[in-house]
Image (spheres, rainbow, N blue to C red):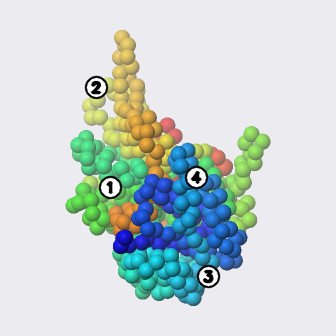
Amino acid sequence: ENEPSVSITVVGASGDLAKKKIFPALFALYYEDCLPKVSIYFSFINPGLSFCNSNFAYKGYLRNMVSRTLTCRIDKRENCDEKMEQFLKRCFYHSGQYDSEENFAELDKKLKKHEGGRVSNRLFYLSIPPNIFIDAVKCASLSASSGNGWTRVIVEKPFGRDSESSAALTKALKNYLDEDQIFRIDHYLGKELVENLSVLRFSNLIFEPLWSRQYIRNVQLIFSEDFGTEGRGGYFDNYGIIRDIMQNHLLQILALFAMETPVSLDAEDIRNEKVKVLRSMRPLQLEDMVVGQYKSHTKGGVTYPAYTDDKTVPKDSLTPTFAAAALFIDNARWDGVPFLMKAGKALHSKRAEIRVQFRHVPGNLYNRNFGTDLDRATNELVIRVQPDEAIYLKINNKIPGLGMRLDRSNLNLHYAARYSKEIPDAYERLLLDAIEGERRLFIRSDELNAAWALFTPLLKELEEKKIIPEYYPYGSRGPVGAHYLAARYKVRWGDLN
Ligand code: BG6
């Protein structure tokens, strides 16, 4: 009876993220009965963008949008339609400007009406352009936080463009919210295999003892997409792939991968260890970075566009759509081990993976089986974050038979074969955590500062010197410079073997 209610308001609900991720995730949580019993979901939409003007029309839109973009794990199930109708009964829409206190005060009234006098907790998900971010936070915290329970705000990147703008944003946010009300999302932290990294390391005896410079030759963090910035050029051109993927998604994975054992699994203990790793890293150097941009390519009669063919991108844009970098952690565990990152759009495949290449076996009795190419004989642990989640370990094995020949085979934990349960989308995990006040998978402000400190000097240098990206054809494996960069550290990219 007296259970507090939770009101979730998505500010910027007509945007792509809300359509493709936030609402499908909310529905999936609803379907699984994971959301608090008394909960309502508001869509805050800018009237200029609005295509419907009543709750009824809005629900029609929502039904359509959610079912179209639903992560397929729900729509195959029973009672989906029935659940959808129940879900929609809790969905409301509110039209207004994201930076208007008055419009937020109106939202407050509506929220109160639906909350029906209960203690109510309020979660705001800001999925809006960075330039109106602070105003929206201000309005939400001043005019729509009278729910007499907690108020939390989920914010999406970009958290600034560099150290200075990020610090300014943090300072401005602090005027309206306490740090523990701010949930900075990095959805890669909500991915199943990223979350599993700590389990792999800290609950298996066989990995952690090997997890250092003593046994690991290099670590590779690879992100690639087989499509370009289609439709997002306007946003992307102001940020580029380094800010879009490396400074956050890949760096977060790196921190989790490389951190020391935390005191406990509490959010603060984990984030303390992550920030230590970030602060032990050397800021990136221009010579340890390769940048690229995709150009048009015709294949099988189809012409794929160049990045600069996008109408919202200036013709002379130098913004990188690909980058490769070598990073180093100057601490006792990782001294001298290259952490190579590679991120790109419009490449030949879509994948995100972590590759750990181990050192050569000393005095290997079987060396002669590998000729001169000992790199091919080393163990490699691959954590395939997506698609087709898997963890596999490459080992040397005797080919059965009377001879003595070896090959490399995989010990393979293939999720689809091992687990019958579908993997929830990252946004489901993160939304649920925000509702439960679990901060483990959200970015603390000191982590953010440390992340920017690593990338800011390099980003400035790239822009000041107007470094020309290496052009690569749409759908290719990216600029050849990435190979030279890796070769400088005696590394071969594992995804190309
Ligand atoms: C976002 C980036 O953070 O992550 C996008 O802004 C990118 O450019 C996306 O496409 C990739 O996420 P996922 O979950 O589809 O791998």
> Residue at coordinates 42% horizontally, 58% vertically from top-left?
34
The furthest residue to the right? 301
Residue with the mark numbered 1: 258
Disc 3 to disc 1, C-alpha distance: 43 Å
Residue with the mark numbered 2: 365
Q: Residues within 10 Å of mark 3 (few under 14, many from 20)?
A: some
Q: Residues within 10 Å of mark 1 (few under 14, many from 20)?
A: many
Do residues under tags 1 and 2 come within 8 Å of each other at their CB atoms? no
> Residue at coordinates 64% horizontally, 46% vertically from top-left?
475
Residue 78 visible (yes or no): yes
Q: Earlier in the sequence, mark 3 or mark 2?
A: 3
> Circle 1 sits in a helix, a strand or a loop, which is it?
helix
Q: Earlier in the sequence, mark 4 or mark 2?
A: 4
Left or right? Give the position of 108 relative to 263.
right
Q: Residues within 10 Å of mark 2 (few under 14, many from 20)?
A: few
Residue with the mark numbered 3: 97
Given this view, does label 3 or label 4 mark the residue nearer the observer? 4
Disc 3 to disc 4, C-alpha distance: 33 Å
Q: Quadrant of ligand 1?
A: bottom right
> Residue at coordinates 45% horizontally, 66% vertically from top-left?
185
